[in-house]
Amino acid sequence: MNAIDTSIGQTQDELHLRSVLLTKIHISLLSSSGLFLALYILAFYIWEALPSNQIIVWVLLITATMLLRMAVMRGYSPKIDSLDYQGLLKFKWSLLCCSLMVQAAVGSGIWFLGPEATTLMKLSMTAAICFYGIGIILALSNDYRVYLYSSTLLFMQPLVYWLFQGIEFYWVSLTIIFVVFVGLTIVRTISKNFAESISIRFEQNGLMANLVHARTETLFALQKAEKAIMDKAFYLASASHDLRQPLFAVNMINETLQLHELPDSALRLLKIQSQSIDAMNNMFNNLLDISQFESKKITIVRKDFDINDLQLSMADEFSTIAAKKGLQFRFEIPQVAVHSDFDLVGRVLRNLISNAICHTTTGEVVVSGEVLNQELVIAVHDTGQGIDEADHERIFDPFVQLNPAPGTGKTSIGVGLSIVKHISELLDLRLQLKSKPEMGTTMSFYLPIAS
């Protein structure tokens, strides 16, 4: 990366000034070589016709000013990348002073010819000065003000000279004026476009600086979030053993008490307590599960298995639960072998069925399957209250529970669908949701057919 693009924190003026100076440095050697070559060709041309001492003085004058300019250039060029704005300004004004001396020296060539020079020699000198003026456009094209000063010192001398030569030579003065006008127009246009390009680059640098800052903040926030998730997972994993022990003890006490002869009122209380313990145990397991999924500590074991093995393990369990709510429940899955993780697919299906029964008060819950393009599409459909489209994404977030339908209540902490989403992403199940209020809900996912 060159000096123009290095610091995205520099000001627009500094960026513009540094770019101008770099351009001058890059073409300084070329322009200086061209000037010296043209100078010596012209000197050789008029050497025989004019007093040599006058030509020598003019050549030495130009050579001295050029060497001074090159010395200034050489002194500043190696350290331009490290210069601050004030240092760049000092370089610019030093270079400007040297350049003005060079232009003044070149333009003065018309005066060094003397009375012995022929009109052809004077016109040749004037033409050489004009060509040089056009040539410096390359070096000063991006700095209109400097070109204006330089061209004034360069062209003013031959212009004034020919004005005093009589009306028959006014065409020379008009030609010089035309050359000056064309040069100023070209440099003004190029300089304006250059300044606009610097402005655009400055804006891009500003956007890049903001992007770098935002990226740094985002990475920092991401690291904090990942650390928080890992800390939470570690805490829950560490605490799970200690938390399970009293929960297991309470459950054992409850089951032991139910074996004793107790009044019916006490048995009813123990039954209610048993249900509460089961619910608490289920919530606790879900909480640990979501922590494991968020920390990505789940091992995937893919294998071929018959989908009916899952159906048989869930049919009786959910049929009983659905019957208690007065719901019809059935499986309509063809007998087919699939290739995936048996346990994780089972958890997806179990959570979807449980969620469907929980949020359905009348009607049915149907688990269907269809083979499409070497995939088994399993869909869990219910006739519940449905889900508003605005909530389709939100229901998969942890701990989100929508307003339950009358009679359904809240029986979990709202992580079942979040677990389903995590497993779907791990196994690439392409989970899909179709639901509208009062129209029921259908959740489906895809399993590859076993080879």
Image (cartoon, rainbow, N blue to C red):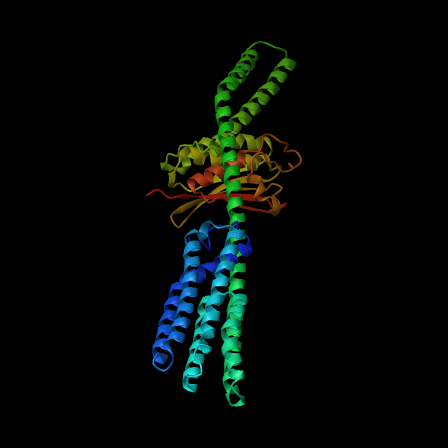
Q: Quadrant of residue 203?
A: bottom right
Q: Nearer the viewer, residue 240 or 351?
A: 240
In x, y percent, where is residue 173? 52, 83
In x, y percent, where is residue 335? 40, 40
Answer with left or right where residue 168 lies relative to residue 53: right
Answer with left or right where residue 272 lies relative to residue 318: right
Who's the residue at 56% across and 38% down the image? 397
Q: Does residue 175 lie above or below 414 as drawn?
A: below
Who's the residue at 57% across and 23% down the image? 280
Residue found farthest to the left: 451
Which quadrant is the C terminus positioned in?
Answer: top left
Q: Does residue 188 lie above or below 234 as drawn?
A: below
Query: For the image shown, how many numbered marks are present on the structure?
Result: 0
Q: Nearer the viewer, residue 113 or 350?
A: 113
In x, y percent, where is residue 13? 55, 56
Q: Nearer the viewer, residue 165 or 74?
A: 165
In x, y percent, where is residue 171? 51, 87
Who's the residue at 38% across and 64% down the image? 29
Residue 311 showing in the rendered view? no
Q: In which quarter of the image is residue 274?
A: top right
Residue 307 showing in the rendered view? yes
